[in-house]
Image (cartoon, rainbow, N blue to C red):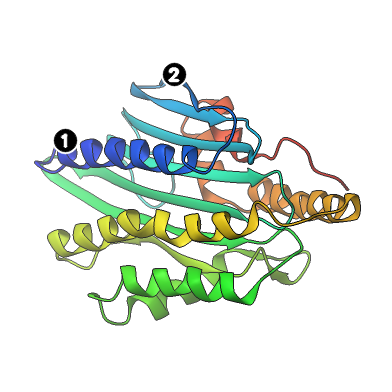
Amino acid sequence: MSTPNRDEIVAYLKDLRDNIIAGFESVETRGRFERKTWPYAKGHGGGEMSVLRGEVFEKAAVNWSGVGGASFPMPDANGPFFATGVSLITHMRNPKAPTVHFNIRYIEVETSPGQTRRWLGGGFDLTPMGFPFEEDTRHFHGVAQRALADFPGLYEKFSAQARDYFWIKHYGHERGVGGIFFDHWSSGDFARDLAMWKSVGNNFLDSILPIYRRRVGEPATEADRQTQLLKRAHYVEFNLLYDRGTKFGFESGGNPEAILCSMPPLAAW
């Protein structure tokens, strides 16, 4: 069931993970990421969690996984599978600095002997914790547009999908200020799809580091902190009620600690 692209994809993801960690650590004033490996109990492979608890990042998690098994645990495909990806979340100490989420993933499923279905997914989105800044939103979406500039129509498509996907139904609003989101992406030209997917990954740090360098030193009050904690609660609710990645992680037998890395260290209701 292997493809000639699998090793390349895993190597790319691990390099991307390392580059993102280095980028975040360039902003952090105290602390470094701590790494922890885990085995995949229901098949083969596993993953590595990387978690930072610092002065700038109250909590950040940058995780890689590569797992395979006998049966794909979702209803849209059946058969032996391999799934790999990088996912991350940040929860900032300063309420004026937004949370950012990023994920890219590759999945292949052997639907019948000699027949493999494969697709890509991913994106990144920005969630101010009560303090949106228009210049931050413009910058973030501008980088997303640049990442997809060589793929006409995809920014418009993926940004609309992000608005739909990150909609919190019980509140009737988006989780944040959007970004890009795509899932089960397969245009029929895998080489082109892979180039697009890598462009999303390669541009991610440019979307967020300038924002963090602007915001982590902003003055903030205790009232601002309480606003941040209440907004974090909405983030928790979305991830536990609606997020497909969380559901896939649990249903595929993934590591609960790694899956729940997306949770903030503190929230309020």
Q: Position of residue 175 (x, y in %)?
A: 66, 63
Disc 1 secondary structure class: helix
Position of 171 with respect to 53 (left or right) is right
Residue 1 in sight: no
Position of 21 with respect to 108 (left or right) is right
Please name the residue shown 16% across and 40% down the image.
8
Please name the residue shown 71% across and 66% down the image.
169
Q: Position of residue 206 (x, y in %)?
A: 40, 59
Tag on residue 38?
2
In the rendered view, would you say 53 is above or below 129?
Answer: above
Tag on residue 7?
1
Residue 218 in sight: yes
Q: Earlier in the sequence, mark 1 or mark 2?
A: 1
Q: Position of residue 183 (x, y in %)?
A: 39, 59
Per the model, the C-alpha gap separating discs 1 and 2 is 20 Å
Disc 2 secondary structure class: strand
Please name the residue shown 68% across and 50% down the image.
241
Position of 101 with respect to 197 (left or right) is right
Q: Position of residue 132 (x, y in %)?
A: 69, 69
Q: Residues within 10 Å of mark 2 (few under 14, many from 20)?
A: some
Please count the marks in the image. Answer: 2
When asked about the image quadrant of residue 45, the answer is top left
Given residues 87 and 170, the one toward you in this image is 87
Q: Residues within 10 Å of mark 1 (few under 14, many from 20)?
A: few
In the rendered view, would you say 60 is above or below 45?
Answer: below
Amino acid type, label 2: Trp
Given residues 156 and 215, the one toward you in this image is 215
